[in-house]
Image: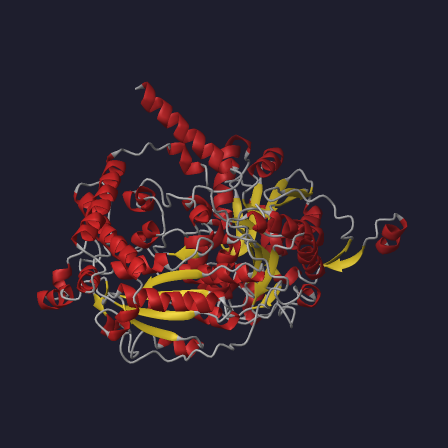
Amino acid sequence: MTVQELPGAGASHRPTPPPAWRPRTDAAPLLPDAEPYRVLGTPAADRLDPALMRRCYAELVRGRRYNAQATALTKQGRLAVYPSTVGQEACEIAAAMVLEDQDWLFPSYRDTLAAVARGLDPVQALTLLRGDWHTGYDPREHRIAPLSTPLATQLPHAVGLAHAARLRGDEVVALAMVGDGGTSEGDFHEALNFAAVWQAPVVFLVQNNGFAISVPLAKQTAAPTLAHKAVGYGMPGRLVDGNDVAAMHEVLTEAVRRARAGGGPTLIEAVTYRMEAHTNADDATRYRGDAEVEAWKAHDPVDLLERELTSRGILDEAGIQEARDAAETMAAALREGMNADPVLDPMDLFAHVYAEQTDRLREQAALLRAELDAEGDA
Amino acid sequence: MTTVAAKAAGTGAKPATMAQALTRAMRDAMAEDPTVHVMGEDVGTLGGVFRITDGLAKEFGEDRCTDTPLAEAGILGAAVGMAMYGLRPVVEMQFDAFAYPAFEQLLSHVAKMRNRTRGAMPLPITIRVPYGGGIGGVEHHCDSSEAYYVATPGLHVVTPATVEDAYGLLRASIASDDPVVFLEPKRLYWSKADWSPQAPAAVPGIGKALVRRTGTSATLITYGPSLPVCLEAAEAAREEGWDLEVVDLRSLVPFDEETVVASVRRTGRAVVVHEAAGFGGPGAEIAARVTERCFHHLEAPVLRVTGFDIPYPPPMLEKHHLPGVDRILDAVARLQWEN
């Protein structure tokens, strides 16, 4: 497959691709605001687009239902593990919504919801966590990189892909997601530095949900905010309320627009909270108190938007019910898909190691084949 | 003179170094395929600290031969993203021990991307790693790190020992749809041979060993920087009445078992020679496989002559560490195996 045949490539070919290295020329200020940017509950909400907000609401409700269903599936033993994004749905949904078809999403292991919101089949999105194969979809088809379990290692991939697209003259933006813990990893720093030096069209979205498994942000960093980290690399840092989907949508849209226009990368810190444990295998009561969790419940991303939209007459009972019904339909389909036992071919173990199987793998495949045949005969 | 004879024969062959052949391989690949991109620290304006990428930035522009920030995980990680978009990155790691920061990218992503996506997303990345000692380099500049690479499923690992293989194997690596760790024996960079890029001798693709010298008494199995040492040892062994066969593996993964096994079955004796530490080194795997498949043909145990199991020594002591002719001949003598 050549680059030109890739989905999303070539749609807007530039006669002269920009050089690999360019000095920063964008006038956007680097320093983040002192307080997270908010729209809901502020005068800025006067300019909300009703149609867009109704869509955001439906996606948030669906996302919340998706989280609940996936968590239930772990209790039924259908999923080995599920890292919940309850409380973080506004970040996940906004990240998916601001991207165009040719853009790429680079999710971390926690970001299945963002992948689903981008249009990935909910069952395909969960195969990694079910355990039948590591990636249940074709990344090129959906422009969604495999969910990355190693922390922050997918960020340099986003930079390389965005850089390559720009070299080919394609207006592709890569949006890479990482948690607060991931910002301590070396790959986070190398990716930000490469992106800034190359002025690559990348948006880094840090979901600061308070904890890296059990370690709180105060033990993760001494920086004033994670958004401040942008300054040292020479890219704008933005601090935003991660539970305010309108603010998330606005800030991400602006970062994507700047990236697409050649303005370079942006680092966005979304301040949010993980309402549930790290995964179903974690006990969050060991490291945080009920009072903290209760306080964040009052700042729930779904409720925030629902209150704003109903008080403004943008959303009514019928609209709420419609969103809930659509979410139930998704949940039922997900249950059905996950309750069907996947049919696995053990010989797949050897099928995708190399383009051409080595003698060694052929020999081992024959051994497994013989074992399977013996089991079949027994 | 060979050069005159070669010119007379019309092949255009003239003396060339391994370094020149490597440069030529990248140049030809870049000229033929616009998706081939060379990247790494110092590869552009400087042409690399060993000058292997010399002239590429000038000829193809800095977009095709790019000086990157100094960060190996970032270099390889960015190459992953570029390969995901359809490019063929050729990454330089400058020195063997400088590649270690990139190991998470290599092990967690480069080696696994094809597998985790069920073949949907192969990564055609070539990772050039100058490796090995014998150049008087200080600490962190002389590691033989091949054992780490060969122990990682999903990677191909190749290493040339001759000028013509340097060209042929690098072309094959860049053309491969799978990631290839291309180990460059840096002490052979300036080795010369009569060679013509216009008419490169057929170098079969990745995964083929070659009998460099035929013999009947025993087989020396080696690769990369140890090949010339083994050939020298084979010449010296003639005085002792030993007629040694020398097999150059060229590719560690895949390992050309058939060529090795056929040779050992002919000679009945084998010594594996490499610079990397012996314990857990490639020689252990090769000796095990040879024993499994040649047991009834063997007149003696398969022996190994390797670097010691020590961190790479300081340059003034490296001559004691590196497998030399005498140590190889001592092993050959032990192959007489009279209990």
Residue B64: quadrant of the picture: bottom right
- Above-or-below relation of A323 to B96: above
Q: Residue at x 62, y 70 (%)?
A: B49
Q: Quadrant of the C terminus of chain A?
A: top left
On the picture, is B185 further left or further right than A242?
right
- Above-or-below relation of B253 to A292: above
Residue A370 in percent (x, y) is at 40, 26
Residue A65 visible from this viewpoint: no
On the picture, is A313 further left or further right than A265?
left
From the viewer's side, name the closer residue of B164 and A127. Answer: A127
On the picture, is A117 further left or further right than B158?
left
Q: Residue at x 66, y 52 (%)?
A: B33
Residue A187 in percent (x, y) is at 41, 65
Residue A227 in percent (x, y) is at 34, 74
From the viewer's side, name the closer residue of A329 and A78. Answer: A329
Residue B315 in percent (x, y) is at 56, 70
On the picture, is B252 further left or further right than A265?
right
Residue B263: quadrant of the picture: top right
